[in-house]
Image: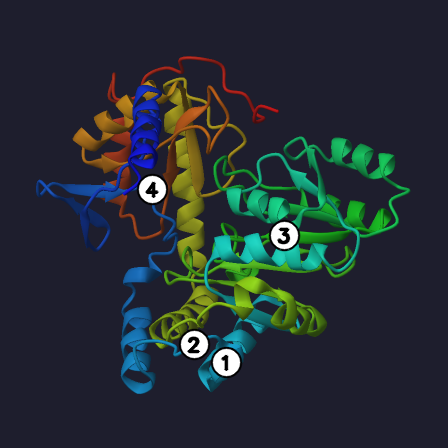
Amino acid sequence: MDNTLNTEILAALDALDASNRRRRLRAFECDANRLISTDGRRLIDVCSNDYLGLSQHPLTKSRAAEWVMRYGAGAPSSRLVTGTRGITFAVEEKLAAFKGCEAALLIGSGFQANATVIPALAALSDTLIFSDALNHSSIVHGCRLAKARTMIFRHNDLEHLAELLRDNNSHRGRRLIVTESVFSMDGDRCDLTALVALAEQHGAALYVDEAHATGVIGPHGRGMVAALPSSVGTVDVVMGTLGKSFGAYGAYIAGSRALIDFLTNRCAGFIYATALPPAVLGAVDAALDLIPTMDADRTRLTTNATRLRSALHAIGLDTLQSSSQIVPAIIGTEAAALAAAQRLNEAGILAIAIRPPTVPEGSSRLRFCLNSALTDAEMDEILSAIANNGVLPAPTSPSPSQPPP
């Protein structure tokens, strides 16, 4: 091994340790809604994205097992090499209908989708991208890989976006606005109706990441895009993941038939990747049957998120503009956030500390992600741990709403 490389790697790890930013993998076993740590303690999970508990639902598990036995453990290659199974086409058609779009395309992961679809679209013409300041890292990487000029507008500041669009009105190529519908770290929502209107006013295309909205928000969990009145307009590109509310794995793009046909020919993340395996397709197929029937679960999730925000506010912690099942508790420094997570861990609650560079400097936080499988007793236990003096400290510094330039 190159000793110089190893030395540099160790120095980089030491620097991460010194700044309280080093990440480490931890081992857990899963038992229903509890995680079992290596020391045998059972922890309530309030940090996963399994918002509807479908990863453990009998129907998703049984259909995944059934499709493995019928179709095999894996996919043999890229869909353009060995062809596409009928079950894959069927799930894509079912997804498109669920999202209210003409067609859908399955892709390996959410990161893979954003990081490769955005460059594919940008390559169509001289594209100018307008991206929300708090967009997910996968979108940031997609914009970088696109090698297109990218303008960052202040988080959810549509006046700033409108100003940037006006200032670049003479741009002859395409203008592409990219946003999340529910933001992954702050738990707030974009003003999608206003964004659609702004995009149409300026002749821009609109790309919306629905990863954290689908399954939870909108009519029967179909997402924020599906909740738009027909009179408002449309979203050009809808992206979503299958590893959150769907309880499975993978991602999809939904939109026009022409969009999907184009991505089949030009999206590297689709062309050069192995297809999703039958077990995943079976789980997604089952989830598509279940999600529209789970309005009571969505109501429960909303109620519990409101209770959690109230409990955090009661001890003086900022939850920003959260209005979803994602509830940030802003702590401040990395060390303070890690200490708060450890105290909750000792109280039997698994809530992970999120630190820079994932979030802006000075806004390290505990990121609570609730799921509808939490029982009343478990919610009471969570709220009791939060209310216990000393479990969560007061913030150590003001929490900026924007990342550093």
In this rendering, is residue 302 above or below 328? below
Which kind of residue does numbered mark 4 sit on? Cys
Labels 3 and 2 touching (C-beta < 8 A)? no
Which is more toward the observer, 179 or 73? Answer: 73
Per the model, the C-alpha gap separating discs 4 and 1 is: 38 Å
Which kind of residue does numbered mark 1 sit on? Val
Q: Nearer the viewer, mark 1 or mark 3?
A: 1
- Number of callouts: 4
User: Can the viewer see residue 180?
Assistant: no
Which kind of residue does numbered mark 2 sit on? Ser
Per the model, the C-alpha gap separating discs 3 and 2 is: 29 Å
Q: Residues within 10 Å of mark 3 (few under 14, many from 20)?
A: many
Q: Which residue is mark 4?
A: 47
* Residue 13 screen position, x and y as percent: 31, 29
N-terminal label among 3 and 4: 4
Specify the quadrant of the image occupied by residue 228: bottom right
Query: Residue 77 got which mark?
Result: 2
Query: Residue 81 got which mark?
Result: 1
Labels 4 and 1 touching (C-beta < 8 A)? no
Per the model, the C-alpha gap separating discs 2 and 4 is: 33 Å
